[in-house]
Amino acid sequence: MEIGKDSKFTLSVETLISISVTIFMIVGLWFNLQAEIEEAKQLPEPPISRTEYDLKDQMIRNSILNTEEKVEKLEDKVDDIKEDTRSINDTLLKMNNN
């Protein structure tokens, strides 16, 4: 097979067979995957048990309470930082006035 005037491209029978087998395998995998996807779409959703629901609900509630506690601690720290900043400002103002 010639690609251009000065170039030639040759393929052996083994190479053609290898390429064909590879393409056949890829196409087979593609159709298999599509079939599995369609099958999965038809399956019913798994039911969530009451125990699982209660555990997840409790976990979420605990997480919210934990976050709330952390926010309160951060608010206290911010208030402390504000107090410290005011104190530093007052001290600097007194030093500048003297």
Image (cartoon, rainbow, N blue to C red):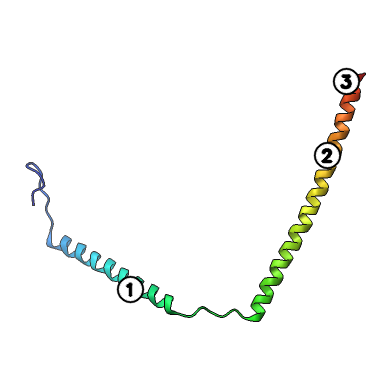
Task: Say which residue appears at 12% left-offset and 59% top-offset.
Answer: 12
Residue 50's disc number? none
Indicate the position of residue 5 as horizontal and vertical percent values: 6, 42
Task: Say which residue appears at 70% left-offset and 69% top-offset.
Answer: 59
The residue pinned by badge 3 equals: 96
Q: Relative to 31, is 2 on the left or the right?
A: left
Q: Find out whether the residues at labels 1 and 2 contact each other: C-beta distance under 8 Å.
A: no
- The mark nearer the N terminus, 3 or 1, is 1
The residue pinned by badge 2 equals: 82
The residue pinned by badge 1 equals: 32
Q: Is residue 92 above or below residue 59?
A: above
Q: What is the three-letter code of the residue carrying label 2?
A: Lys
> Can you say which quadrant of the picture contains the C terminus?
top right
How far is disc 3 from disc 2 in space, using C-alphas? 21 Å
How far is disc 1 from disc 2 in space, using C-alphas? 64 Å
Q: Looking at the image, is mark 3 or mark 1 nearer the viewer?
A: 3
- Number of residues whose C-alpha sits closer than 10 Å to that of mark 3, classed few (under 14), some (14–19) or many (20 or more): few
Name the secondary structure under disc 3. Answer: helix
- The mark nearer the N terminus, 3 or 2, is 2
Residue 62 picture quarter: bottom right
Residue 66 picture quarter: bottom right
Name the secondary structure under disc 1. Answer: helix
Q: Relative to 95, is 46 on the left or the right?
A: left
Q: What is the three-letter code of the residue carrying label 1?
A: Asn
Name the secondary structure under disc 2. Answer: helix
